[in-house]
Each structure stands twice: as C-alpha cells, then as structure tokens.
C-alpha cells in the first residue's frame, strides 16, 4: 500500500481535531479510522508535534534539514582529514 506523506500543517490540524474529538468522548481508534491514519502515526506525530504551532513546526523541519546537511559536511571533512593524515604518514 502506498504511503501518504503529510505536511506539518496538515499533521498539526489533524492533531488538533483529534484532541477536540477526544475531549467530546470519542474513542482514539474511531478517530484514527475516520482520519485515515493509524494509531501509531497519531502517537508518533503527537510526540513530534504536540504543543507546536504551525510556524514552530516549519522552523523545526528547517532546522532538522540544516542539521542533516551540516552532519554530512562534518563527516565528509572528517573522512578527508583521515585520508590526508594517512597519506602524510606514508601509509598507502
């Protein structure tokens, strides 16, 4: 089955709707079925986006992307440093 990709604003909207309907007395499973998501997705999203506003969620995603890019740059530079150090020692 194809996997759906939800945007942060859509996820936050679903979480807010879920909380409202839960406060009205509906069961979690029934709400998830009506939103067409699994309960695992709900709990994962609640852990990641719970209490965030839309602008905060967008900023969080941007920071996560930048963090991944920087980690990759550091690992590339570390690898280059190790290669140059090995070449300087004469171990080919």
Image (spheres, helix red, strand yellow):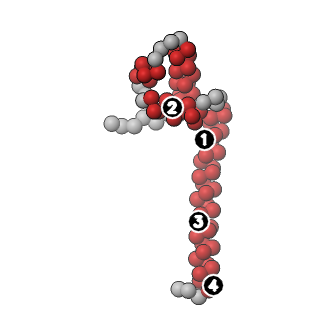
- Alpha carbon separation for disc pair 1 and 2: 18 Å
Where is mark 2, residue-wise?
43
**Pointer 4 with pointer 1, Cβ within 8 A:** no
Q: Which numbered circle lies on residue 61?
A: 1
Residue 85: x and y in percent read 63, 79
Say left or right for 26 vs 54. Answer: left
Q: Residues within 10 Å of mark 2 (few under 14, many from 20)?
A: few
Give the answer, above or below, for where 62 lies relative to 57. Answer: below
Q: Distance between the residues labelled 3 and 2?
A: 35 Å
Are the residues at dot 3 and dot 2 in contact (C-beta closer than 8 Å)? no
**Residue labelled with disc 3:** 76
Placement of 77 over or under 37, stated as above or below? below
Q: Label 3 to label 4, Cα distance in Å?
A: 18 Å
Question: Does residue 88 appear anywhere in the picture?
Answer: yes
Q: Which of marks 3 and 2 is nearer the N terminus?
A: 2
State the CA–CA distance, disc 4 to disc 1. 41 Å
Residue that appears at 54% across and 25% down: 15
Residue shown at the point (64%, 28%) measured from the top left = 51
For the residues bearing labels 1 and 2, Cβ distance under 8 angstroms: no
Residue underneath mark 4: 88
Callout 4 secondary element: helix
Q: Nearer the viewer, mark 4 or mark 2?
A: 2
- The residue lying toward the viewer, choosing from 72 and 20, is 20
């Amino acid at each position: 089955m194809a996997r759906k990709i939800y945007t942060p604003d859509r996820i936050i909207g679903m979480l807010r709707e879920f909380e409202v309907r839960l406060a009205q007395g509906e069961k979690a499973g029934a709400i998830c079925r009506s939103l067409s998501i699994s309960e695992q997705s709900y709990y994962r999203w609640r852990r990641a986006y719970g209490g965030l506003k839309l602008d905060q969620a967008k900023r969080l995603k941007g920071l996560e992307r930048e963090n991944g890019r920087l980690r990759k740059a550091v690992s590339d530079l570390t690898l280059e440093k190790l290669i140059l150090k090995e070449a300087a020692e004469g171990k080919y």
